[in-house]
Image (tube, grey):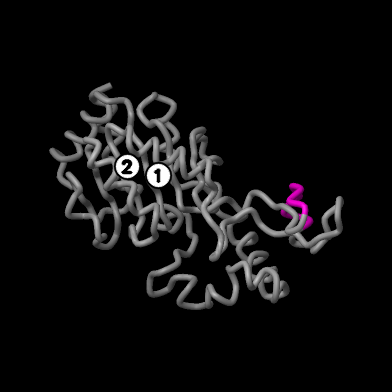
């Protein structure tokens, strides 16, 4: 994205003060976490249908537990990157309305973002498979049973075979429809229904920008696209905003 284009995006953000940001796995890879669908992604190493489904949770709990315990360990060592930090700062300035994320690492909240819609849940939460009482990551990892009913514990993430959380999804649709600016960061935009949100924003009159390493199916409708790294892109955008605010 050229300097002139970033300037136009910054101007739109400061004028509308109603930007919605949509983040995918590319946001997390800049914190050292693996994505899912790239050549070296998680699902090219392990089969999601064996590990991340409701069936696996109920019928092969040992493999299910081992997979998510490893993910807990990997994510516990990750820290927010500069992109997460810039988004939190722009929210504090009143420029970003919310972040809609497909990521489950919780790094937006750690960085300080307050309005975060986690479409796929978060590894930061654990609950009982049976009575749904909240529990802790430590209890999940050590395989302690639920303190209420004795059931097995599970992470609070959306598994294959489950619906996205209704309240979070509804809030995300509404934010997309009302956005003045809609920015996609690090998403391949291949997972439905969330991949429809940029198009909904565009139809409602939003200025749409997409920053992703690879081409996405919705690049054609964006006002601007870039293949820059997310941290580099947001650093340039922040500088332009600082000039205009």
- The quarter of the rendered structure image containing the C terminus is top left
What SS does tag 1 mark? Answer: helix
What residue sits 49% from the left and 60% below the top?
A: 33
Residue 14 included in the magenta stretch of the image? no
Q: CA distance from mark 1 to mark 2?
A: 6 Å
Please provide the residue range marked out in magenta.
131-139
- Judged left or right of residue 216, residue 21 is right
* Front in this rendered view, residue 31 or 182: 182
Residue 129, position as x, y percentages in the image: 73, 58
Residue 146, position as x, y percentages in the image: 82, 55
Q: Which label is found at residue 165?
A: none
Residue 154, position as x, y percentages in the image: 70, 59
What residue sits 35% from the left and 47% below the top?
A: 231
Residue 214, position as x, y percentages in the image: 27, 62
Q: Which label is found at residue 234?
A: 2
* Front in this rendered view, residue 116 or 237: 116
Q: Is residue 162 above or below residue 119?
A: below
Residue assigned mark 1: 83
The answer to whether the residue labelled 1 contacts the one labelled 2, judged by CB atoms less than 8 Å apart, is yes
Residue 134 included in the magenta stretch of the image? yes
- Judged left or right of residue 128, residue 35 is left
């Amino acid at each position: 994205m050229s300097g002139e284009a970033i300037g136009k995006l910054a101007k739109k953000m400061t004028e509308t003060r109603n930007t919605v940001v949509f983040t995918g796995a590319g946001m997390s890879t800049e914190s050292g976490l693996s994505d899912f669908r790239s050549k070296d992604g998680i699902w090219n190493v392990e089969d999601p249908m064996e590990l991340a489904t409701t069936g696996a949770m109920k019928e092969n709990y040992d493999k299910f537990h081992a997979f998510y315990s490893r993910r807990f360990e990997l994510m516990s060592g990750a820290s927010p990157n500069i992109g997460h930090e810039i988004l939190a700062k722009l929210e504090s300035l009143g420029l970003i309305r919310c972040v809609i994320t497909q990521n489950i690492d919780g790094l937006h909240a750690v960085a300080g973002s307050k309005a975060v819609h986690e479409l796929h849940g978060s590894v930061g939460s654990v609950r009982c498979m049976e009575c749904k009482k909240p529990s802790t990551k430590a209890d999940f990892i050590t395989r302690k049973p639920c303190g209420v009913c004795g059931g097995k514990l599970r992470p609070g993430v959306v598994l294959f075979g489950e619906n996205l959380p209704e309240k979070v999804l509804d809030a995300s649709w509404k934010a997309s429809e009302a956005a003045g600016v809609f920015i996609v960061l690090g998403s391949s935009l291949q997972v439905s229904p969330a991949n429809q949100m940029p198009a909904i924003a565009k139809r409602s009159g939003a200025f749409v920008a997409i920053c992703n390493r690879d081409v996405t199916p919705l690049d054609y409708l964006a006002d601007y696209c870039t293949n820059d790294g997310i941290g580099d892109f947001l650093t340039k955008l922040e500088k332009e905003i600082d000039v205009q605010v």
